[in-house]
Image: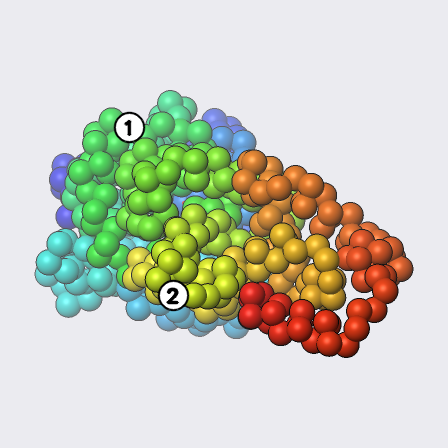
């Protein structure tokens, strides 16, 4: 239990509907259905978390979390379209087409000696299934701005932790003692940075200090959970600002040690990373799709290139082979921190290993590159390198132009129209080419 939990007042500040700006138009129809059905069945039903926070600061919430005094089994009994998930936290997911409304039962704090709660040696919460009342639930939430409850019974907002004031001050504050709360769940450090970047809030000084002291605890977090967090950090449209904050608080190196080491060895790597993050943010802002493999490739690019050069110095191999091998080794190391699924690492490694092929603009093999299934990703990657002065502009122009050319024009561009050479010379060239070109 955190300190403030014990001494905290039990009565919330209740802000009645006429005194706040959250209207039901801001709330998804599905979330409203869940709230009303729980309420009509005699349970308490509140909207909680990010949706209330975002609506209060004028962002349009997209994700709705419900909190109730109904147990997961009681929720399941009310909704046909409901699945119970989770072990660490048991939750109900109520599905409406593609939308999922997450329904959580109020929980008491996890430090009780109850059999349904469990902490590890560092104080990290492993299991937290002790149900409780709303005035207990509030203290296990992370930030004050995330601990506001919107009551469907009368549309009022219940504020136990001073979240409304902190939102007005644009301040991110953990409920309770920051050190205790960060040790309970080190991912809260990443959440702090993510919300600071997204909301433009500042991290209050005691929390800022505590993050700096506890950054290394991220090493205790399962790598699979950090992959989920990685997606939220870098695909929410605020990746550039998030990256800056992660580095400022020394959290980035905990997630991407090889990238951080390379940045420290060669700050020339940063402009490329920033260009990629800006590009990602632009795409997210425009509603376009983004794939995590692209950014992961960006993060691992300079370390991969450095290791590839070392491998080539040790053993004779093509640049492309060395990039493929180096990226394999770097991915293996990276997985210990952030578990990246194979469906992303495989195309990512291909994208990196293909880069040398942009320097070859003559011949059939160069022409065939246009049809490679990873051409588009590799091309976008190369364009970004060019944008920051790390690849040749003329070559970039060549590969941009040939994509719109007709078959005949391409034959000219790749200089495939020359007079046929004698068979012997051609065979000799092919053998030589096979040795010096890559295998990807
Ligand atoms: P967003 O959905 O915009 O990322 P959110 O605040 O809704 O932000 P969720 O991860 O959806 O974040 O969690 C919903 C709520 O659950 C949070 O607002 C917070 O109250 C609580 N919560 C989530 N994760 C934690 C955590 N690690 N520690 C404590 N409380 C948490
Ligand atoms: Mg949410």
- Position in image of residue 87 (x %, y %): 30, 68
Left of 126 or right of it: where is 79?
A: right
Question: Which residue occupies the foreground of this view, 204 or 219?
Answer: 219
Q: Is mark 2 within 8 Å of ligand 1?
A: no
- Position in image of residue 430 (x %, y %): 66, 72
Q: Is residue 291 visible?
A: no
Residue drawn at 79 percent across, 73 percent down = 422
- Give the tally of numbered discs: 2
Residue under circle 2?
315
Q: Secondary structure at mark 1?
A: loop
- Position in image of residue 325 (x %, y %): 42, 65
Q: Residues within 10 Å of mark 1 (few under 14, many from 20)?
A: some
When asked about the image quadrant of residue 160, the answer is: top left
Sequence order check: which comes first, mark 2 or mark 1?
Answer: 1
Query: Outermost residue toward the top?
Result: 169
Question: What's the CA distance linking mark 2 and mark 1?
Answer: 52 Å
Q: Is mark 1 within 8 Å of ligand 1?
A: no
Q: Secondary structure at mark 2?
A: loop
- Position in image of residue 135 (x %, y %): 26, 45
Question: Which residue occupies the foreground of this view, 433 or 373?
Answer: 433
Q: Which mark is residue 204?
A: 1
Q: Is residue 422 visible?
A: yes
Question: Which residue occupies the foreground of this view, 321 or 92?
Answer: 321
Question: Which residue occupies the foreground of this view, 197 or 294?
Answer: 294
Query: What is the basis of the colouring in this image?
Result: rainbow
């Amino acid at each position: 239990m955190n300190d403030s939990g014990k001494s905290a007042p039990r009565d919330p500040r209740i802000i009645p509907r006429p005194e706040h700006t959250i209207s039901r138009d801001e709330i998804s129809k599905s979330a409203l259905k869940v709230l009303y059905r729980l309420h009509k069945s005699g349970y308490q039903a509140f909207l909680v978390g990010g949706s209330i926070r975002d609506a209060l600061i004028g962002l349009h919430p997209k994700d709705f979390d419900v909190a109730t005094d109904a147990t997961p089994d009681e929720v399941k009994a009310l909704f046909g379209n409901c699945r119970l998930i989770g072990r660490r936290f048991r939750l109900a997911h109520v599905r409406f087409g593609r939308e999922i409304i997450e329904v959580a039962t109020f929980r008491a704090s996890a430090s009780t000696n109850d059999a349904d709660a469990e902490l590890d040696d560092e104080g990290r919460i492993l299991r937290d299934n002790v149900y409780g009342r709303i005035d207990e639930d509030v203290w296990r939430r992370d930030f004050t701005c995330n601990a506001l409850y919107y009551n469907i019974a009368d549309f009022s907002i219940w504020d136990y932790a001073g979240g409304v004031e902190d939102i007005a001050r644009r301040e991110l504050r953990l409920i309770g003692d920051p050190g205790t709360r960060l040790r309970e769940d080190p991912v809260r450090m990443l959440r702090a940075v993510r919300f600071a970047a997204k909301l433009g809030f500042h991290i209050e000084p005691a929390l800022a200090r505590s993050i700096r002291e506890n950054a290394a605890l991220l090493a205790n977090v399962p790598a699979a959970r950090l992959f989920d967090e990685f997606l939220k950090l870098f695909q929410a449209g605020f990746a550039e600002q998030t990256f800056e904050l992660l580095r400022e608080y020394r959290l980035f190196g905990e997630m991407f040690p090889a990238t951080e080491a390379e940045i420290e060895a060669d700050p020339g790597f940063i402009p490329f990373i920033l260009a990629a993050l800006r590009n990602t943010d632009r795409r997210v802002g425009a509603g376009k799709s983004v794939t995590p493999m692209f950014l992961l490739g960006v993060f691992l690019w300079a370390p991969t290139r450095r290791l590839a050069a070392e491998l080539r110095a040790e053993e004779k191999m093509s640049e492309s082979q060395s990039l493929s091998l180096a990226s394999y080794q770097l991915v293996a190391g990276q997985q210990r921190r952030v578990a990246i699924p194979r469906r992303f690492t495989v195309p990512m490694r291909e994208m990196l290993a293909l880069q040398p092929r942009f320097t070859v603009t003559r011949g059939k093999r160069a022409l065939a590159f246009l049809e490679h299934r990873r051409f588009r990703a590799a091309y976008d990657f190369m364009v970004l390198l060019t944008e920051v002065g790390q690849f040749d502009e003329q070559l970039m122009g060549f590969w941009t132009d040939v994509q719109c050319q007709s078959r005949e024009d391409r034959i000219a561009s790749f200089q495939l129209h020359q007079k046929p050479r004698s068979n012997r010379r051609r065979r000799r060239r092919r053998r030589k080419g096979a040795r010096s070109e890559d295998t990807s």
